[in-house]
Image (cartoon, helix red, strand yellow):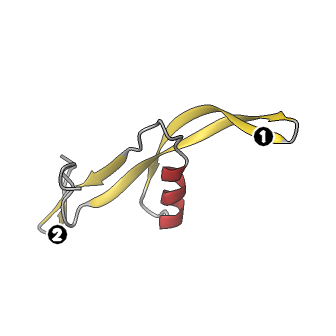
Amino acid sequence: AEKAGVGVGDQLIAVSGIVYDRVEEYGEVKVSKGQSRIRLAARGETLKTLGAAISSHPGNWEVALEFQRCEGGAVGAAE
């Protein structure tokens, strides 16, 4: 986290997730198609929901995490 510039007290404000716009069936197998990357705001979401969004990424897609720097108790802009 330090290498990425995330510090103690920084708040997670958004994560990326993958949504699929269609499902194709091949016999008994269903395959999700039409991948799109979305930004999910973290405020008000459960850890379970955020974890599901993060784990929705295929292995070759990067996960994006957005943090907001908090200094001296005040919420500041992300750097």
Closer to the camera in the image, 32 or 15: 32
Residue at the (29%, 53%) spot, across then down: 67
Residue 42 seen: yes
CA gap between label 2 and label 1 equals 48 Å
Q: List the single residue furthest toward the left.
A: 72
Task: Describe the element under mark 2 as helix, strand or loop.
Answer: loop
Mark 2 highlights which residue?
Answer: 73
Percent x, y of residue 52: 54, 56
Residue at the (48%, 51%) spot, across then down: 54
Task: Describe the element under mark 1 as helix, strand or loop.
Answer: strand
Residue at the (36%, 49%) spot, across then down: 65
Residue 8 left/right relative to 29: left
Q: Quadrant of residue 58?
A: top right
Residue 61 left/right relative to 7: right
Question: Which quarter shows the N terminus?
Answer: bottom left
Which sits earlier in the primary sequence, circle 2 or circle 1?
A: 1
Q: List the single residue furthest toward the bottom.
A: 73
Q: What's under tag 1, amino acid-wise?
A: Lys
**Vertical placement of 1 versus 72: above or below?**
above
Q: What's under tag 2, amino acid-wise?
A: Gly
Closer to the camera in the image, 34 or 78: 34
**In this view, the mark in front (2 or 1):** 1
Residue 46 seen: no
**Vertical placement of 60 versus 45: above or below?**
above
Q: List the single residue furthest toward the right.
A: 27
Percent x, y of residue 25: 82, 35
Q: Quadrant of residue 7?
A: bottom left
Residue 22 left/right relative to 49: right
Mark 1 highlights which residue?
Answer: 30
Percent x, y of residue 59: 50, 41
